Image: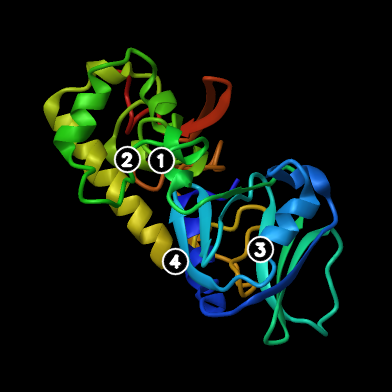
Amino acid sequence: MPELPEVENVRRTLQDIVGATIARVDVRLPRIVRRPADPAEFAAALAGRTVLAVGRRGKFLRIATDGPVLVAHMRMEGRFAVCRAKEPEEAHTHVVFALSDGRELRYRDVRQFGTMDLFAPGEEFRLPPLAALGVEPLDPAFTPEALAGMLRKTTVAVKSFLLNQSYVAGIGNIYADESLFAARLHPLRPANSLAPDEVRRLHAAIVATLVRAVDAGGSTVRSYVDGRGTAGSYQHRLCVYGREGLPCPACGRPIEKCRVGGRGTHFCPACQPYS
């Protein structure tokens, strides 16, 4: 699933459509559209509207028009791409936004798990899914003190805490594992057991890891590409995620894998002791 760095890079590469007018919308897989329930109503609401901004909230894209606001989640393998209308379509292209300048914004989703919702301007922040999201980890409001306040309130494993979007929005399995490794924290540690210096280390690790990943275009560990079809490169810098049995880049001991909250979790038992 694309996480904050991947979605942020998609957002940046979709800036090309700002100012373009949506001539029509072709919804070929109705279940991707959740709000309104009728895909024809969804298409009619966007036809003739001009794109004002492309934003991101957690793992969601937010495309604002001079009418409704589109909130989209790419889930496992969804992709947005801006193409010339005459370019051949890839298989599994389920929604096409035809632009009046001869381009198309295409949504492709092999797994078909993606979602799209329309809201009146401003309404998207008061209703699910965006209303349920926690603080943005690259926002100034995400401070060590704010993180400490959230950690104190729960006894769940710190890995599970990082994956809970109602606390911190945008972190998934990849960057939770990488942040915990950088902070030298065991993923099964209870969230409220972290000492002040450990909280500071975790905060710094989250921010630094996400910034580096954004700058590298995200991580392409399966099929992720940005809105221009470019793969990320941060997967070449991953220290623990997906590296079970390989040597830890810091100490050389084999990376281990366990399950935390039902999610595969990678860590170094030497660099991240449970203590």
Question: Which three-letter amino acid code belongs to the residue tagged 1?
Answer: Ala
Mark 1 sits on what residue? 169
Closer to viewer: mark 4 or mark 2: 2
Q: How far apart are marks 1 and 2 (CA)?
A: 6 Å
Q: Do the residues labelled 1 and 2 touch (CB within 8 Å)?
A: yes
Residue 212 bears which disc, if any? none
Q: Viewer-proximal residue, 47 or 7?
A: 47
Disc 4 residue crowd, few under 14, some 14–19, many 20+, Cα 10 Å: some
Say which residue label 3 marks. Answer: 46
Q: Are marks 3 and 1 in contact (CB under 8 Å)?
A: no
Q: Residue at x 52, y 51 (%)?
A: 120
Mark 2 lies on residue: 135
The residue shown at (85%, 78%) is 88
Instruction: Evaluate whether residue 98 shows in this view.
Output: yes
Q: Which of 28 and 253 is in front in this view?
A: 28
Disc 3/disc 1 C-alpha distance (Å):
27 Å
Q: Distance between the residues labelled 1 and 4?
A: 20 Å
Residues at circles 1 and 4 in contact by the CB criterion of under 8 Å: no
Q: Earlier in the sequence, mark 3 or mark 1?
A: 3
Q: Which amino acid does label 2 sit on?
A: Val
Residue 170 visible to an observer of this rendering: no
